[in-house]
Amino acid sequence: MGLNTATFSQRRRILRQKVEGGAILILSATYVPRNYPAEVYPFHQDSTFRYYTGLNDLADAALLISEDGTETLFCTTPDPDDVIWTGPVPTNEELAAMAGIAHAADMSKLAASLTQHTLFVKPYDGHLAIRLSTLLGLSVTALAHHESVVLRRAIIDQRNHKTADEIAETEEAIGVTKLMLAAAETMNREGVREADVLAALMGPAIARERAQAFEPIVTVHGETLHNRGYASTLTKGRMLVIDCGAESPNGYCADLTRSFAVANVWDDRQKAVYEAVALAQKAGIAETARRGASQYDVHIAACRALAGALADMGLMRGDLDEAVKAGAHALFMPHGIGHMLGLDAHDMENLGDDVGYAPGTSRSTQFGLNALRLARTLEPGFILTVEPGCYFIPELIDRWKAQRHLEAFICYDEVEKFRNFGGIRIEDDVLITDTGSRVLG
Amino acid sequence: MGLNTATFSQRRRILRQKVEGGAILILSATYVPRNYPAEVYPFHQDSTFRYYTGLNDLADAALLISEDGTETLFCTTPDPDDVIWTGPVPTNEELAAMAGIAHAADMSKLAASLTQHTLFVKPYDGHLAIRLSTLLGLSVTALAHHESVVLRRAIIDQRNHKTADEIAETEEAIGVTKLMLAAAETMNREGVREADVLAALMGPAIARERAQAFEPIVTVHGETLHNRGYASTLTKGRMLVIDCGAESPNGYCADLTRSFAVANVWDDRQKAVYEAVALAQKAGIAETARRGASQYDVHIAACRALAGALADMGLMRGDLDEAVKAGAHALFMPHGIGHMLGLDAHDMENLGDDVGYAPGTSRSTQFGLNALRLARTLEPGFILTVEPGCYFIPELIDRWKAQRHLEAFICYDEVEKFRNFGGIRIEDDVLITDTGSRVLG
């Protein structure tokens, strides 16, 4: 049980069957220098390399699957003197065997094994781009034009459908993330700094050697959607928003958001907005269970529920179906309802919109909807987030109000009263099943 | 007092006076993607850009100082819609004013301001290399040939000499690092995992929003000098080695190492090896205080003291001056005695060996001495580490013993008895003063 050598071998066989043509080249991640090459960011394996090899810690390597299916792992052979810095490390042959790969070779041999028919996907990282450019004799800018769309889509299709082992890994990561949130909640007291909450949040993850799927958001300014920094102090009357996710031992990501009234003292407005977001999430999750629903439908269902609740509060008005169609709710929720979740928090975002949009479809340009990363028809095995929110963003309110934007649907005078409210978001991770859907964890 | 706008203006004026010729270009760091561009590593400013601007958080920007001293800050102007993700941000003009820079412009204007005479230093980071290559119309590999050695050496000379404000920042960072070490020490109990110790260590740093100068080492396998991972369990009889350093609010680094017997239960061998390393450190620090001493002299003084103590323990023998000259001590301490410390843990390591070696001198190729990052004559204002260690590295012992390497100086039969000992290192940060030197913190 669990992810093992056979898993990775099978994944590679399936990929090779799906993709005709030249050899398939997949690079591992490199060490990324922080301010000089010997000081690197914590190593994070390339997700695609990880998916096909399970070699979570191997930098500066490459997998080559030839047209006839012969597999070779190319590794940077360590200098014998490196043992004083790194301790004993596996040989290239041992590394290949761990992944079920028949052949091993030194990275210096890789360039000679490549041809102009070698299939690859465009790297997202500058260091990988420089490496691939050197290997292939192409300029960095030319890489995009030579990538294999067939390979990219085959990887996406395979990785989009999670197996039982991958689901178990995701649930394990969610379990650790809930421990993190519980530790953070103990610090939800007036006068505590966001950074203190973060320290508590990180404890259970560090003690389990867990990477974070993304930099945690811990903020009393939820209205700034990707707030960086943890300098504010928890004061009564504000909402504390925590959006975080641990990785499982094999790199599968959790992504949960919880919103708390500071010191757990809720006023009526906080209760009402929280209820509105909870209703929106319920409607979204219900829609994920409908056979044939797309994540676009999930988005609209959640936004429609949010708009209904906001109308009950006197913040929106008019025909709410029309309001949602026009994007009026995006004043309050200017982001998408969720994204694919897997070895990346935004799974395979480096591979582009083919992950979330079926070939031939593309993103809307409407404000709010243009941030919807996933819209395609849901299929069993997809794991995705459902994360509605409601935010009062002063700059956005001012801009829309000055333009009298969609004023048929928005009660600006009432909205004005919430301009210092902050924001609320609730997020869970949902698996699409053969019979419906299931909230994980 | 403290680092302020006037500080950064003055630093730029001094640099411009030192470097004749074309305009000086200094790029800020970019956001570095982890597994896709929207998910980045915690932002870490380029140290040289930080030194000359104080703009700790500004990504994707550039400082240009024209030949006549006119200064312009080029920034990536945010999309107005970004306010929902980032909250309100300063304008380009406000950012320039914070650094005392007279002019501000959009990054799109930068390329037109550059000529083939623009002076720059070679980037250490792939993303910066691609950016600079595009800006200058040079290939990535050509950048190294076009960098300005005069500019590089002027930056090194200026940054190598720390001012009172920089010393105060370093001491502040050392203060936080000592809080981290104290928190870690409370976890020094049998049966605790290294990762648990790490979680305790990180608490005080996270709660103060402090970046780490480098990934902390927390290990009961000190014999692996740059041990990554925290999976081992603390067991009695082992040494726990912790090497870590917080950054100050403006990015100045601390770098301390402490070694503890697990559960604070010391056996005779641990006491003896610890004493040997402490003696070596004392000898090294004493040498830093000698006017005209070089860090090479500091290295040799520490190694000689270590060799003396190891001879007393029966591990080394013969003429110990000759032993150190031949590099026999490097079986036990295969690294250098220390490095420059500043805005980087290995200060300006990205700028190469000119930092630690005077022009015209270069590193030894002798094993051990080839890892000495700093050898030049010490000058007032230098901050450097003094970090002797003593390690029993089984692979290295086996290799040397099989070759009967330097057996006139090494008692391999006695060394063999220590092969499972692990390692010990003690590290402090030392300021060279007008009258001698001072251990900081």
Image: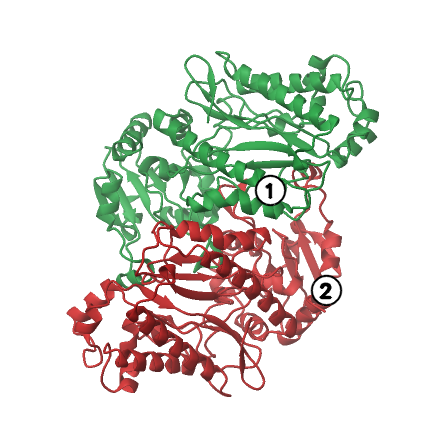
Chain colours: A red, B green
Q: Crowding at label 1, few (<14), some or many (≥20) Cα neighbours within 10 Å?
A: many
Tell us which disc is closer to us: 2 or 1: 1
Comparing A22 with B13, the one in front is: B13
Q: Mark 1 lies on which chain?
A: B
Comparing A111 with A301, the one in front is: A301
SS at mark 1 in the image: loop
As displayed, is residue A322 above or below residue B33?
below
Comparing B254 with B342, the one in front is: B254
B307 displayed left or right of B417: left
A394 displayed left or right of A24: left
Could you tell me residue A169's position as x and y percent? Answer: 61, 67
> What amino acid type is highlighted by mark number 2?
Thr
- Report the residue at 52% width, 69% height from top: A341
Tell me, yes or no, if residue A116 can be seen here: no
> What amino acid type is highlighted by mark number 1?
Met
- Report the residue at 59% width, 40% height from top: B217
Residue that label 2 marks:
A5
Where residue A216 sits, quadrant-wise, is bottom left
Could you tell me residue B236's position as x and y percent? Answer: 72, 38
SS at mark 2 in the image: helix
Residue that label 1 marks:
B187
Count of numbered labels shown in the rendering: 2
Q: Do labels 2 and 1 share a chain?
A: no
- Report the residue at 41% width, 83% height from top: A297
Tell me, yes or no, if residue B429 can be seen here: yes
As displayed, is residue B227 above or below residue A223?
above
Q: How far apart are marks 2 and 1 (CA)?
A: 37 Å
Report the quarter where the N terminus of chain B lies: top left
As displayed, is residue B198 above or below residue A149?
above
Could you tell me residue A53's position as x and y percent? Answer: 66, 62
- Report the residue at 62% width, 73% height from top: A19
